[in-house]
Image (tube, rainbow, N blue to C red):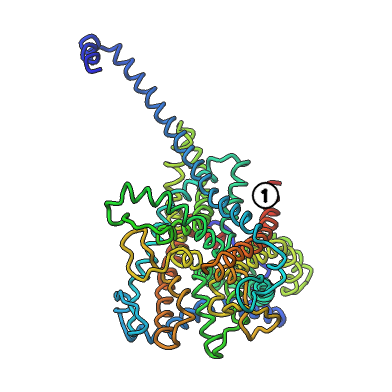
């Protein structure tokens, strides 16, 4: 190769105009190709990165579906853990989640929605910003710290783990989520509706309740459902509050109560294949409900975005 | 941003009694969020004070955590927390930012919408389910493939030395990367979408390719907002509890390799809080929580500020 280059050089010297012109043209074409290659390369890389992001989603869903469905049986749904030995089902966890999450919702929704009403409709610029900022920060507080926080004032004074504390911890997690999504929904309500109502002499409080909140209702419900889905899957805030229980606890919020995430955690960390299978079964149930809520709610707003 | 008019609202100055009651009532609920945040910090400080005043700065720098001897040094858990979060961000930031660029700039609408939906679903999967998957699927797979390969090729560097267990810092980092990916993607995407079209049009009119437009006209504007998104992801990774607790292997020493078993602050609290003696040991664990709170709050405030300044979107909020 070097020999060929050396033999070419004397013929087309760098000073001769015509070959230089050609060389420049070639150089320009080469640069264009490089730019095109860089463009195509980076775009392909971005596509690959996006597809990589899908791999874990597929992996988790596939394994939970396969292993979970295999572990699913009537006992898992209808029986509590056996008092002695290994086996039984997850009824204690199912019943616990079905009680603690609704109570948490009842606590969190009024606080979150009315808090959002204040931020969106009443608050001064500064005070609204403070509340909004606090909500954003609260979303970022690790959920295990919320567990400790509730532990210090609802468990420690009574020396008793209890389901009520569990619900309060879940509510603390739900409030900022509900508040921010509700605020978003209220901002989307057109000013003309409020003005029309106020111009008719309707008091402000009735305008907010029956015009603003009413119009923003679909968005508020979306936020509430997503907050519920999130609370259902939370484990860390329940560890030091509701604690978990092998007994099926119906209605006694002064005593420990189990929840599906706690059940999954306990059974997954035992060196026992039967218990591990139960964890997969419970994960299947939990994921089914959580994803159903998410797909339903997000799918609807997704449809709106397209249409 | 200053030009943007205030959103419409019904309330303003009102004098009627029911209105004032309603107004202050809703104000009370709004204030409760602030109160929760403040009381949370105060409760952790008060309950952790016993350990903090006993050990002083030794609490942060000590590497012995021995309930029997009554000595509490948090360094191994602080190191573990930061190491796991750094592994996660190193993996998730490039993939997340590229995904956000793809979704916001490059992908056809038909592809962008389902992909966005899928990333949102990734955020919806509960932590404990990731943990379950991590222990029984990811751990064994890593052990026999990636970890073995890294030790074979890079094992002479102490940081990448074996032995590997499948569970440990590396597995925790990967699980965390998966969990913070949606945060990085969705916020970066919002920030990138907020860059005015005139920037793109000017660049394209000059004959730039799509990628040149993205990298030279869009990304420089969105840079600080994307940094905010990554920091928010880092904050989530630092505080994530259940999945990490299940896969990190609960090693009590300062990790020396990315394959070591370790404990994060959150996993240490999760695994030992209920067995702790009320008193100095509980106080030490709550002080550990306080350390975590300070770290995550600082990161959150910085990140929110960056994102808000870049796009006026702090999780969608406007001022």
Task: Estimate the x, y position of residue A188 in percent, counting from the top left.
Answer: 66, 59
Task: Estimate the x, y position of residue A50 in percent, counting from the top left.
Answer: 52, 45
Left of B44 or right of it: where is B258?
Answer: left
Question: Which residue of the protein is positioned furthest toward the bottom in this rendering?
Answer: A158
Residue B13: in sight, yes or no? Answer: no
Q: Please name whichever residue, A188 or A99, is drawn nearer the observer in this view of the structure.
A: A99
Task: Estimate the x, y position of residue B283 in percent, counting from the top left.
Answer: 41, 84
Left of B169 or right of it: where is A288?
Answer: right
Q: Residues within 10 Å of mark 1 (few under 14, many from 20)?
A: few
Please report, as a chain letter, where disc 1 is located: A
**Residue at 41%, 71% in the rendered image:** B265
Task: Estimate the x, y position of residue A123 in percent, counting from the top left.
Answer: 60, 73
**Residue at 39%, 29% in the rendered image:** A34
A104 is higher (above) or lower (below) than B240:
below
**Residue at 52%, 55% in the rendered image:** B137
B50 is higher (above) or lower (below) than A33:
below
Q: Which residue is mark 1?
A: A305
Residue B125: in sight, yes or no? Answer: yes
């Amino acid at each position: 190769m070097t020999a060929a280059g050396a033999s070419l050089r004397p013929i087309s010297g760098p000073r001769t105009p015509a070959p230089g012109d050609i060389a420049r043209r070639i150089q320009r074409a080469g640069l264009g190709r490089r730019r095109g290659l860089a463009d195509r390369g980076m775009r392909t890389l971005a596509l690959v990165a996006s597809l990589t992001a899908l791999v874990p989603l597929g992996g988790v869903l596939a394994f939970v579906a396969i292993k979970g469905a295999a572990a699913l049986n009537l006992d898992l749904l209808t029986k509590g853990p056996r008092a002695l030995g290994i086996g039984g089902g997850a009824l204690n966890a199912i019943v616990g989640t079905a009680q603690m999450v609704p109570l948490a919702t009842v606590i969190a929704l009024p606080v979150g929605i009315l808090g959002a009403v204040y931020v969106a409709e009443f608050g001064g610029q500064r005070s609204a910003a403070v509340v909004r900022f606090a909500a954003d920060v609260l979303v970022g507080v690790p959920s295990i710290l919320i567990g400790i926080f509730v532990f210090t004032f609802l468990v420690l004074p009574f020396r008793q783990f209890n389901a009520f504390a569990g619900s309060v911890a879940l509510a603390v997690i739900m409030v900022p989520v509900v508040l921010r999504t509700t605020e978003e929904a209220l901002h989307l309500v057109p000013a003309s509706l409020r003005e029309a109502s106020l111009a008719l002499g309707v008091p402000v409080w009735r305008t907010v309740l029956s015009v603003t909140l009413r119009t923003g209702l679909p968005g508020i419900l979306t936020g509430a459902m997503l907050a519920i889905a999130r609370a259902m899957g939370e484990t860390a805030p329940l560890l030091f509050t509701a604690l978990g229980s092998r007994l099926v606890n119906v209605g006694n919020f002064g005593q420990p109560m189990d929840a599906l995430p706690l059940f999954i955690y306990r059974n997954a960390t035992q060196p026992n294949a039967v218990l591990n299978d139960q964890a997969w079964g419970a994960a299947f149930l939990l994921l089914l409900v959580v994803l159903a809520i998410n797909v339903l709610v997000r799918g609807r707003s997704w449809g709106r975005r397209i249409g | 941003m200053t030009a943007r008019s205030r959103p419409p609202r019904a309330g303003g100055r009102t004098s009627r009694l029911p209105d004032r009651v309603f107004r202050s009532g809703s104000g009370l609920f709004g204030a409760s969020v602030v109160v929760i945040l403040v009381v949370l910090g105060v409760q952790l400080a008060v309950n952790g004070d016993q350990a903090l005043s006993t050990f002083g700065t030794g609490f942060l720098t000590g590497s012995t955590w021995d309930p029997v001897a009554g000595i509490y040094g948090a360094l191994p858990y602080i190191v573990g927390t930061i190491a796991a979060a750094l592994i996660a961000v190193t993996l998730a930031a490039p993939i997340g930012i590229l995904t956000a660029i793809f979704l916001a700039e490059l992908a056809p609408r038909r592809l962008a919408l389902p992909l966005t939906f899928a990333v949102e679903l990734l955020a919806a999967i509960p932590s404990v389910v990731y943990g379950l998957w991590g222990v029984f699927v990811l751990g064994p797979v890593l052990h026999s493939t990636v970890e073995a390969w890294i030790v074979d090729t890079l094992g002479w560097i102490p940081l990448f030395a074996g032995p590997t267990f499948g569970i440990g810092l590396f597995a925790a980092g990967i699980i965390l990367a998966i969990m913070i990916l949606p945060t990085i993607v969705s916020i970066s995407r919002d920030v990138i979408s907020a860059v005015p079209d005139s920037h793109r049009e000017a660049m394209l009119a000059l004959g730039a390719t799509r990628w040149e437009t993205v990298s030279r006209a869009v990304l420089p504007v969105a840079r600080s907002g994307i940094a905010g998104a990554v920091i928010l992801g880092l904050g989530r990774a630092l505080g994530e509890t259940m999945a990490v607790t299940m896969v990190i292997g609960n090693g009590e020493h300062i990790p020396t390799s990315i394959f070591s078993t370790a404990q994060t602050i959150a996993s240490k609290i999760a695994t030992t809080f209920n067995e702790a003696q009320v008193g100095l040991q509980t106080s030490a664990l709550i002080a550990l929580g306080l350390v975590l709170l300070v770290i995550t709050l600082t990161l959150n405030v910085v990140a929110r500020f960056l994102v808000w300044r870049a796009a006026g979107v702090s999780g969608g909020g406007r001022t």
